Amino acid sequence: MSDDAQLIASAVRGDRQAFADLVRKYQRRVFGIALHITGNRSDADDVAQDSFVKAYRHLADFDGRAELFTWLYRITVNSALNHLRGDKRADRLARAGEAAGAGARPERAGSDRVRTPHEWLEVSERLRRVLEEIAGLSPVLRVTLVLATVEQLPYKRIAEIMDVPEGTVAWRVNEARKQLRDRLHEPAREGEESL
Amino acid sequence: MKPPDDRPVNPIDRDIADAFAALDQAVAEVNLDDFAARVLVRLDQAPAESEAEPGAEDSGLHDIRALASSARRRFSERDGSEADGDDSAVLLTAAHGGLRAVALPDAGARAAPGRGGPNGVRTDAVGESRRAETRRVDARSSAPFWILGSVASLAAAAAVAVFVFGIGRDRAGPAGEERGEVVARAEPTEGRPAGDAPGGAAGAAPGDLAAATGADGRGFATPPPPPPPEPEATRATEPDQRAAKSARDTGRAGGADGRRSRLREPSSEAKGKVGGHGAAGAGGPPTASPGGEGAPGGASSAEKPPAGGLVGGVEGGTEGGVEGGVEGGAAKPGGGTVSLDDMLDEATGKRPSPSPEAEAEKKKKEEQKKGLDRRDVSKALADIGDAVQRCRSVENVRGTVSVKFVVAPGGQVSSAVPTGAHARSKTGSCVARAVTQARFPAFEGDPISFTYPFVLAGGA
């Protein structure tokens, strides 16, 4: 019996500590998926917590045929989708670039060469824009795109996770790319500073 | 991240990958130490929540709850020490106080028994900051007793003069007696709020010098006396007139009530004076109804026969009381437009007016940027240009010195380290020291790190 299986069995019997161990083991990956889909830390934290709560409630239904993380992955994606559909706050776009703006270090995302502040700011602005435009996609397109291009999942697996045919996944990915490309090539919106 | 085997790499995917790599950096920096604990807490809190209402997410109910919750929190925060944790009570109190303050003119509010605001602060005070109100209350409580004493003495002297010189006896009819009685009754009502005086006449009669001269210390509902149109009125004693003047002056100074009245009637200066005259014609209770005109009151008291003076005075005082407040407000220095929200807040004493420092702090916070843009960086680095260039003389070095520095959200440079060829040179250290003097605009978020190549060039 694997570690996960033991922990799951204990958690199903009501051992909270065992479940806490499972959470600790997968929290960063689950949080990462949630962050990729929601685009900001606050929502990602919500979604990740929500996913683990759902997982705990349905832990007894987990049959062990797939890996636990795959199961968690699916729960997280669906939680994030629900979150996006239910959350229509107007500042979503603004918050989407939070990490690329001040939180993250774009210099690490690109090449390792020394950047001047101007270059740094241009990279930052570019990444912020990309994240904003991804956040502007419909929830379904966004999630599909993230799973395909960021999580690097095969279409087949994405189809399983999202419970749609593989062809639909392919169409969504292409459509998301097309929309993103169009939006990124648009001139900067009014009020945005072009760097 | 390697691309899947069955798909070509799309150019747009590079941008996406870079953007999400930045996001991943953010993930790496997020502290998830207590995440498991929070999940367990949520497990304990949420068991019924999502299963009972599976569609709650999209129902919009959460928005309403959030709104209600934030409103309660707002009231609780305003309430400060007055709140005992019962938010609904706070809400009720606030609404009640607000309606009272808006619907009733000051005089009526004062006359209403048991309507004092929390902590003894008058809830009918509208228009000035709470701090100013508190000061006023203090001044009132530390009552200028010498004023009261001198006023009482003047009243007594006037009464004696009237008696000695027989003026009082010459008065025809009972009106003079009424006035005399009022003057005499002034002493027992000293220092009491106008609204506490028994009966309208005693509360604001012209003879009630204590009330007229401002034991209250603020805008008076009782306006000053008019120029006497009838012989009866000309017999008004000098103290009466002085008291009236004082009341008029005090009424101008008193801002709270007046400012409320001013909202009701912007061009109330003239009306206020007329109203004041009307009230002073015979006085009356401060229980004025909204919209009362001072002029009719004055006219009635002036035109009525002496026997009806008291009745006319009651009307005049009643109506003039409102306009007296108007006058006070209109003449209040610096009186500006007050929003309904401010009035409610002031009336319920829920929100202390922010101090200038707090306002400045708030403004500063609002002005904080989300990050630094090119102009900010250029300007901050240009400001230290001279200091950087002075580093040439350390080792007589020309060329580029790269410095990696971190700008804290406060705008100050939290660290600066020379990199590259000058990582360990004195010149590099000198430039790094100069960089620490740079000041950037404050911004929100995490510290930002830069690596900047400073060029040391030019003549010796």
Image (spheres, rainbow, N blue to C red):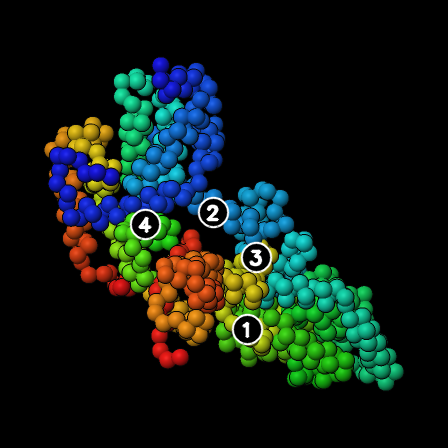
Instruction: Report helix, strand or loop for mark 1.
Output: loop
Of marks 3 and 2, which one's residue comes earlier in the chain?
2
Whether marks 1 and 4 lie on the same chain: no
What residue is rendered at 85% in x and 82% in y?
A: B161
Name the amino acid, label 4. Answer: Arg
Label for residue B351?
3
Residue B182 image position (x, y, % from top left): 77, 71
Disc 4 on helix, strand or loop?
helix
| Amino acid type at mark 2 | Ser
Task: Same chain for labels 3 and 1? Say yes or no.
Answer: yes
Q: Amino acid at mark 1?
A: Gly
Q: Nearer the viewer, mark 3 or mark 1?
A: 3
The residue under label 2 is: B70
Q: CA distance from mark 1 to mark 2?
A: 32 Å
Q: Amino acid at mark 3?
A: Arg
Q: State the separation of the CA atoms marked 3 and 2.
A: 16 Å
Q: Chain of mark 2?
A: B
Residue A21 in view in this figure: yes
| Callout 4 crowding tier (Cα within 10 Å): few <14, some 14–19, many ≥20 | few
Name the image quarter holding residue B237.
bottom right
Chain of the residue that carries numbered disc 1 in the rendered image: B
User: How would you rate the neighbour count of disc 2 (Cα within 10 Å): few for under 14, some for 14-19, many for 20 or more?
Assistant: few
Q: Which residue is mark 1?
A: B335
Instruction: Estimate the x, y position of residue B347 in percent, counting from the top left.
Output: 58, 59
